[in-house]
Amino acid sequence: MTQEPGWIVVLNGAPRSGKSSIVAAIQDWDDGPWMNLGVDVHVRHVTPSRYRPGIGLRPGGERPELEAWVPVFYAAFTDSIAAHSRLGLNVVADFGIHDAYSAPLGILRDCARRLLGLPALLVGVRCPVEEIMRRRRAGQAGREGEYVAGSVEEPVPEPVLRWQREVHQPGIYDLELDTSVLSPEDCAAAIRQRLDDPVPPTAFRRLAG
């Protein structure tokens, strides 16, 4: 029996843009299991502590000693997503993918090539920096102290600005969502509508070149 591949939904956006909440809303769908293979899972439970944040490394070339491993980690991560899809499992994965390292690495293009031939939707999860900072200041249960929250002298820290500048380059998506105006459930509904569209997604094919 030929197994139809499962859907892959990749959510790409900056930290605190709302990706994890969208993942949770998608996993509530009743059309079979939606496996969460996102960056938090990979960093927290797969990557050895001395190599963290691994694929969660923020823009800026701040950890050059880790950067040689990042494309390897991403390749393995993406291949595991593809393997789940080929077994007929739906996958939702939240990324914060960029190429703003100390040397160009072409990680996004490599990931796109590894997903070619599979039904994969690339979603840009956008959120204005003002809302990002509000969420950072509010904190998140279980992740206390993980997010730079700013100060009077630097209300929007440079690392946060780097995420805003780099994470959506080159900005090729099948769907874009603004979580400052849409709830996680609204975002999931928009993704469901796009998956039901007979026109297949093309973002990963265009990024693969």
Image: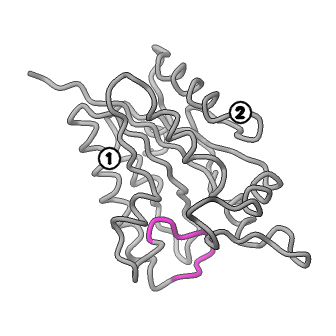
Kindly indicate the quadrant of the structure image that contains residue 172: top right
Q: Is residue 116 left or right of residue 138?
A: left
Q: What secondary structure is found at the residue carrying circle 2?
A: loop
| Residue 175 image offset from top left, x and y in percent | 59, 32
Taking 71 as reference, is 89 above or below it? above
Residue beneath label 2, please? 182
Point out the tag, 2 or 1, that comes first from the N-terminus.
Answer: 1
Residue 203 highlighted magenta (yes or no): no
Q: Nearer the viewer, residue 178 or 122?
A: 178
Q: Nearer the viewer, residue 166 or 52?
A: 52
| Residue 148 image offset from top left, x and y in percent | 71, 71
Q: Residue at x 73, y 47 (%)?
A: 127
Question: Could you tell me how far apart the alpha carbons at marks 2 and 1 are, in whole angstroms?
Answer: 27 Å
Q: Residue at x 41, y 35 (%)?
A: 120
| Residue 200 image offset from top left, x and y in percent | 44, 22
Magenta: predominant secondary structure element?
Answer: loop
Viewport quadrant of the C terminus? top left
Q: Is residue 156 left or right of residue 41?
A: right
Kindly indicate the quadrant of the structure image that contains residue 76: bottom left
Q: Nearer the viewer, residue 105 or 10?
A: 10
Mark 2 vs mark 1, foreground winner is 2
Q: Residue at x 40, y 52 (%)?
A: 111
Amino acid type at circle 1 is: Ile
Amino acid type at circle 2 is: Leu
Residue beneath label 1, please? 81
